[in-house]
Image: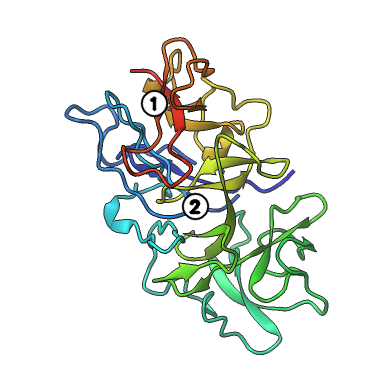
Amino acid sequence: MRPRVHWWLALGVLSGLAWGCGPTVALDTGGADASSSGDDAPAATTTPPPSSTTGVPPATTSVPPATSTTTPPPLDSSSDTSTDDGVGFLDPGLDDGFGGDECDLFAQDCPRGEKCMPWSNDGGGTWNALRCSPIAREPGAAGEPCTVEGNAFSGIDSCELGAMCWDVDEETNEGECIAMCVGSPEKPACEDEGSMCSITGDGVLALCFSTCDPLAQTCPEGSGCYPVGTSSSFACIVDDSGDAGQPADPCMFINDCDPGTMCVPGKFVPECFDLGCCTSFCAVGDMGATCLPGQSCSPYYEEGSAPPGFEDVGVCLAP
């Protein structure tokens, strides 16, 4: 069993889905009501690779890029600090200390032989602070197996400088090293061009996730291609749907839904009586799209805003 990583979903503004990492996307209705009158469709935010999910606007043919946000409070456009250089990230309330505590994730200013690491300073199940931790004698690189000392939130692992142990099994304390972002809080980046930087947890986590195509769903086994952050792309995230996660099943988190589906406001899913429910991705123009009765395949992106190769990405929505 792995710790759940929270990818909080804010549907209040119809353009905010987010993460807050601890180990899944909670629907937050703070902010404008998703069922409010008027246009119901906020301006879509487009930015390179991290997440974005969105409250899906009613009565419109396009779905604004997804956006995640930690709850509370919901994000608004002023908190989107994604860049336009192929790297984006979500800032759910960074403070002036950018995570503060003993060290700086980007500067990696710990003494020689140590690295700046996220950890839980209160023994809880979420990363909430930064500390200098010893680097293992034979550390693993990003993509290699790893182990943690104590638990996933101890801040002590067997990964090299610039990486941390991720997706840790609670029973074995084993996981896989994942690269941390480089650059600076203002202009984060990933050394791997196929990854995007996502900053969450008040700046405590700054990690690089592999980008993906929600229609192809080519992520590793146990993961799905989900919208994350405030950009127009998708990332491979651990699938935490369990026995649920099918279209029309209730959801609070991005990875509550099966790979190939996403969490949207319940009013866009027939027979959904919850704040949010899962719905399928689909290919725009595919008359055989496997949408639920009463739904149709609507473009995921605003017209002209889709990244190259993603023009046919759609999502099943009810009018």
Q: Is residue 200 above or below residue 181?
A: above
* Three-letter amino acid code of the residue under disc 2: Gly
The tag on residue 154 is none
Camera sees residue 84: yes
**Percent of width and height locating residue 232:** 42, 47
Residue projecting furthest to the top: 293
**Percent of width and height locating residue 68:** 43, 46
Give the residue displayed 54% in from the left and 80% down from the top: 102
Specify the quadrant that holds the N terminus: top right
Give the residue displayed 59% in from the left and 23% down from the top: 246
Q: Is residue 204 above or below residue 113?
A: above
Residue projecting furthest to the bottom: 112
Disc 1, SS: strand
The tag on residue 298 is 1
- Front position in the image: 225 or 175: 225
Give the residue displayed 41% in from the left and 18% down from the top: 296
The tag on residue 20 is 2
95 vs 176, left or right, is left
**Percent of width and height locating residue 292:** 49, 14
Q: Few, some or many C-alpha atoms within 10 Å of disc 1 (few <14, some 14-19, many ≥20)? A: many
